[in-house]
Image (cartoon, rainbow, N blue to C red):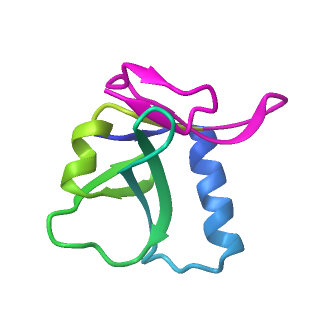
Amino acid sequence: MITVSDKAKTRIAQLIDEQNYDSTYFLRVGVESGGCSGLSYKLDFDNQAKPGDEIFDDNDVKVVTDKRSVLYLFGTELDFTDGLNGKGFTFNNPNASRTCSCGESFSV
């Protein structure tokens, strides 16, 4: 399961509204090779589920990920920060054994 914090939920709703997406759109979360720690997170909006996708609903947010990525993301909380140290989505991933200083990549 992937969970969504209240701050992330608010920011996701704002982005959907800014892009004029309708209610068929959801948040697609993934993991791809790359980044200074080996794996990096991917976030996007989509409105078409693919065969084999895993679908989670948390905090009134529909989150979809592919089967490979869910292995790396299971138990992760998606959060949003707007503090002085940076603004953006953050992943609180219990599976990550190491993360880079920017928080955009990780390894297991």
**Residue 59 visible in the current orientation:** no
Identify the image quadrant of the N terminus.
top left
Tell which of 57 and 88 is nearer to you.
88
Residue, x 25% and y 45% (percent of image)? 70
**Residue 70 visible in the current orientation:** yes
Residue, x 32% and y 25% (percent of image)? 95
Question: Is residue 67 shown left or right of residue 65?
Answer: left
Position above or below: 73 against 46: above
Residue, x 61% and y 68% (percent of image)? 16
Residue positioned most to the left: 52
Q: Position of residue 31 (x, y in %)?
A: 37, 49
Position above or below: 89 against 18: above
Asked if the stretch drawn in magenta spans residue 81, the answer is yes
Question: Is residue 24 shown left or right of residue 84?
Answer: left
Position above or below: 42 against 71: below
Q: Position of residue 81 (x, y in %)?
A: 69, 36
Q: Position of residue 15 (x, y in %)?
A: 66, 64
Q: Which residues are magenta?
A: 80-108
Residue positioned most to the top: 97
Image quarter of residue 3? top left
Q: Position of residue 63 (x, y in %)?
A: 38, 55
Question: Is residue 43 shown left or right of residue 38?
Answer: right
Residue positioned most to the right: 84
Tell which of 18 and 108 is nearer to you.
108
What is the total number of numbered labels drawn onto the structure image? 0
Asked if the stretch drawn in magenta spans residue 17, the answer is no
Residue, x 63% and y 32% (percent of image)? 102
Identify the image quadrant of the C terminus.
top left
